[in-house]
Amino acid sequence: MPPCSPRGDFSRRNLIGLLGSAALVQEGHGLLLPEQASRKLTVVFAGAHPDDPESACGGSMARFSAAGHRVVALYLTRGEAGIDGKSHAEAAAIRSREAERACQILGASPVFCTQVDGATELNAKRYDEFRQVLLAQKPDLVFTHWPIDTHRDHRVTSLLAYDAWQRTQTKGRGAFELYYHEVLTGRQTQQFLPTTYVDVTTTWRRKHDAIYAHVSQKPDNCYELHADMEKFRGLECGCERAEAYVAYARGPARLPIG
């Protein structure tokens, strides 16, 4: 897949990423290029609820999968409080099936933690539990919620992922590279200034289909905003559609991207 078109006279040299040139970011645009990884990666997209990873990163998930990488959707909850008129058990069953269908569309594997939608917790037990589930996947890259967010469950997920990175540090470097994603920016994600982009011009339709697999969430109500976000982020990096991320500055790559 071609990278985004250049914007101005930027340098186009590639910078070496983490773990023995495992991932590459193109300087000047902050373009993450899954096809240029030197080896196959395990990429985990962590979200608070079924549909969060797909909504924030579905185009990137499809692109990593198409490039031959192992893609995991890690859900903190099963969306127990997410369907009016349904018990927690009924909603969890419905939303888990929807997540599994969405993952099939994107070429991802679903993994569920044991927290409960609307009642997520941050404590020593939960930190340890999340870290164990995450590290069991042996991730090279982890994408999770930006911590400044109006939704409490999103904030909890973000801090759990960050703590897992901190707990895996070796000589100042974590075991995986950490990125933050955006969900319904303006309504939920706040003060989000991207450092890194993935061109999803050829994969956004798979993202669309994955979001629409979450029938219980009435996707017509939110997909239009996500489509607008993709187009806006595409304008920022010079392509038709993109998904935007913030690279954790102390991550193992330490990439001096523009």
Image (cartoon, grey):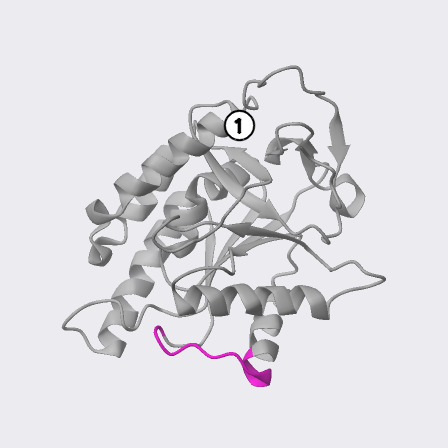
- Circle 1 packing at 10 Å, graded few (<14), some (14-19), many (20+), is many
Tell me if 64 is positioned left or right of 89 in this view. right
Please say whether residue 112 is one of the residues in the magenta stretch: no
Q: Position of residue 40 (x, y in %)?
A: 66, 43
Q: Which residues are magenta?
A: 117-126
Residue 123 falls within the magenta-colored stretch: yes
Q: Nearer the viewer, residue 45 or 118?
A: 118
- Residue 206 visible? The answer is no
Quarter of the image with the N terminus is top right
Q: Position of residue 254 (x, y in %)?
A: 75, 46
Q: Is residue 43 left or right of residue 228?
A: right
User: Residue 226: horizontal and vertical position, in percent?
Assistant: 34, 41
Position of the C terminus by quadrant = top right
Residue lying at the far right of the rendered structure: 171
| Image position of 121 (left or right of 137) | left
Task: Identify the residue under disc 1.
Answer: 237
Q: Mark 1 belongs to which amino acid? A: Cys
